[in-house]
Image (cartoon, rainbow, N blue to C red):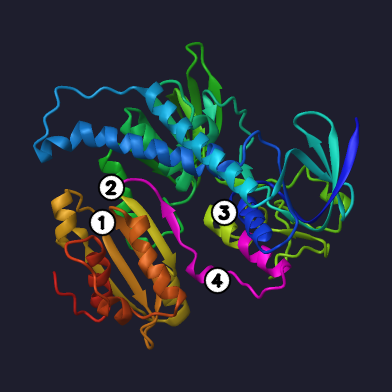
């Protein structure tokens, strides 16, 4: 195998949100930059088989459900609503393709050298890349950034991506399953479970713990579960799935066990979605040829500057401890590029937002009420329901609320939780306020156009001091 050698200031390994964002920033700051990607397209899991295609299907399935159930409330009568799954999947793929092409354009525009192939460390300063097109090349760099992301946790199930699927297969199903069992009531399980529920599948979610969406605020969880149940999703909490075997009819016989008693039952389904979290993708990078240290779960140990125990190698995103979120990886990618360019930079994880893109959406930032009470003993809480918001009422989507949490003495915002229409967008205002150390009063005193959903945010901020005006 012929091999050449090229030298760079910095090389990113993995072209997901952290890698491609960091590479662009590094190049803009004057560093000679390269990026290595083993897929045929850029964007990583998020763009190719994760965030973007799932949101495309969520949007399409929401429109299908709205046309089927809600249009009549607006005086729009349809004789029938039919699902064209092939067309829906075609639209999803088109969205992905257009965005991956956009990233390629940005790489060219910013003069980032792209290598499509799989990289493995020979030592701390040499990365051998087996090129997808054939042959190999060795990349030398002053700094390497591991940004390879994560992969689904298979839980020892035999994944065929047709009947026993991860999120990858759940985004590519050829027909709507009559019954789907989902392992895990986290973000992925709830989002994809809701997609197939809307499209006509009977979905049951099996969750090991005693609650769904366990990182959410307690009050939000109760409202969220009630909403998903009203849409047809079933939940079996405090249970686990032991195995799934195909019967003579080609269906799956799934053994389910109650965690506390050990009692076992068997249910039949067409598709089993394994959505029990993700694991860092660090196994085949040749890290054993460097000084990089990994923990027992495969996460790479780094300091506050994302530097590993090997001074030439850094790591960001899903491969390091912390939330596995694309926007977290993006901020870390920008931060490491700035640090390597001699700038001062830091990621403020206290304002890291999270979103579950179901309907209604769930979005939050900062501490839950339970966490705030643990840290401060008492807190100031404001709430406002969308049922009392004029725009939500006009739109016909009044489910949910905004909840604001402020420091008991300073009134500084320390958390916000929204369940309802456009929650992911509404949260941005609070995230910005928290980034600047803003208080509930700051949000409450700012103009909010009428009628808008954002008024619910303002009213929740006012309710922190029990002065909401529209309840």
Using residue 37 as the reference point, say whether residue 391 is left or right of it. left
Residue 317 falls left or right of residue 137: left
What residue is drawn where x is 58% and y is 51%? 17
Mark 4 surroundings: few (<14), some (14-19) or many (≥20) residues within 10 A:
few
Q: Which mark is residue 400?
A: 1
SS for dot 4: loop
Magenta part of the chain: 333-359
Q: Which residue is mark 3?
A: 324
Q: Residue at x 78, y 34 (%)?
A: 131
Work out which quarter of the rendered image holds the C terminus and state it: bottom left
As for residue 354 lying within the magenta part, the answer is yes
Identify the residue under disc 4.
Answer: 348
- The correct choice, above or below, for 133 with respect to 15 in the image is above
Looking at the image, tell me whether mark 3 or mark 4 is earlier in sequence order: 3
User: Residue 190 sits in which quadrant?
Assistant: top left
Distance (Cα) linking label 4 and label 2: 32 Å
Q: Which mark is residue 227?
A: 2
User: Residue at coordinates 40% horizontally, 62% vertically from top-left?
Assistant: 364
**Contact, mark 1 vs mark 4 (Cβ under 8 Å):** no
Q: Which numbered disc, 2 or 1, marks the residue closer to the eye? A: 1
Q: Nearer the viewer, mark 1 or mark 4?
A: 4
Q: Secondary structure at mark 3?
A: loop
Q: Nearer the viewer, mark 4 or mark 2?
A: 4
Alpha carbon of mark 1 to alpha carbon of mark 4: how far?
28 Å
């Amino acid at each position: 195998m012929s091999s050449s050698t090229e030298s760079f200031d910095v090389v990113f390994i993995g072209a997901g949100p952290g890698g491609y964002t960091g590479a662009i920033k590094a190049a803009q700051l004057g560093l000679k930059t390269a990026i290595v990607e083993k897929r045929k397209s850029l964007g990583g899991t998020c763009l190719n088989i994760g965030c973007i295609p799932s949101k495309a299907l969520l949007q399409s399935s929401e429109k299908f459900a709205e046309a089927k159930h809600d249009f009549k409330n607006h005086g729009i009568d349809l004789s029938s609503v039919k699902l064209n799954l092939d067309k829906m999947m075609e639209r999803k793929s088109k969205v992905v393709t257009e965005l991956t092409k956009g990233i390629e354009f940005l790489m060219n525009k910013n003069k980032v050298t792209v290598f499509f192939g799989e990289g493995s460390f020979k030592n701390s300063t040499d990365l051998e890349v087996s090129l997808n097109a054939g042959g190999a090349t060795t990349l030398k760099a002053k700094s390497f950034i591991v940004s390879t992301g994560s992969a689904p946790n298979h839980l020892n199930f035999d994944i065929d991506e047709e009947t026993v699927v991860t999120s990858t297969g759940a985004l590519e199903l050829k027909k709507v399953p009559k019954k789907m069992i989902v392992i895990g009531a986290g973000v992925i399980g709830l989002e994809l479970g809701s997609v197939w529920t809307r499209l006509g599948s009977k979905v049951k979610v099996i969750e090991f713990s005693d609650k769904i969406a366990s990182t959410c605020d307690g009050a939000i969880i109760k409202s969220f579960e009630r909403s998903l149940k009203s849409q047809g999703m079933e939940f079996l909490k405090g249970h686990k799935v032991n195995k799934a075997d195909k019967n003579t009819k080609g269906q799956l016989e799934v053994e389910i066990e109650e965690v506390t008693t050990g009692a076992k039952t068997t249910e039949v389904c067409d598709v089993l979605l394994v959505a029990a979290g993700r694991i860092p993708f660090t196994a085949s990078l040749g890290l054993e040829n460097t000084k990089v240290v990994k923990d027992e779960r495969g996460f790479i140990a780094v300091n506050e500057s994302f530097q590993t125990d090997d001074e030439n190698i850094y790591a960001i995103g899903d491969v390091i401890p912390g939330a596995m979120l694309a926007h977290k990886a993006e901020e870390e990618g920008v931060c490491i590029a700035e640090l390597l360019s001699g700038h001062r930079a830091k990621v403020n994880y206290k304002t890291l937002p999270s979103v579950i893109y179901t309907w209604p959406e769930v979005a939050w930032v900062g501490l839950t009420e339970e966490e705030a009470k643990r840290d401060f003993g008492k807190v100031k809480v404001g709430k406002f329901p969308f049922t009392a918001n004029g725009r939500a009422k006009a739109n016909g989507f009044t489910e949910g609320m905004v909840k604001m949490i402020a420091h008991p003495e300073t009134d500084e915002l320390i958390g916000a939780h929204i369940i309802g229409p456009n929650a992911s967008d509404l949260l941005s205002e609070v995230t910005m306020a928290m980034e600047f150390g803003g208080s509930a009063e700051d949000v409450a005193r700012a103009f909010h156009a009428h009628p808008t959903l954002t008024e619910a945010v303002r009213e929740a901020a006012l309710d922190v001091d029990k002065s909401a005006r529209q309840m």
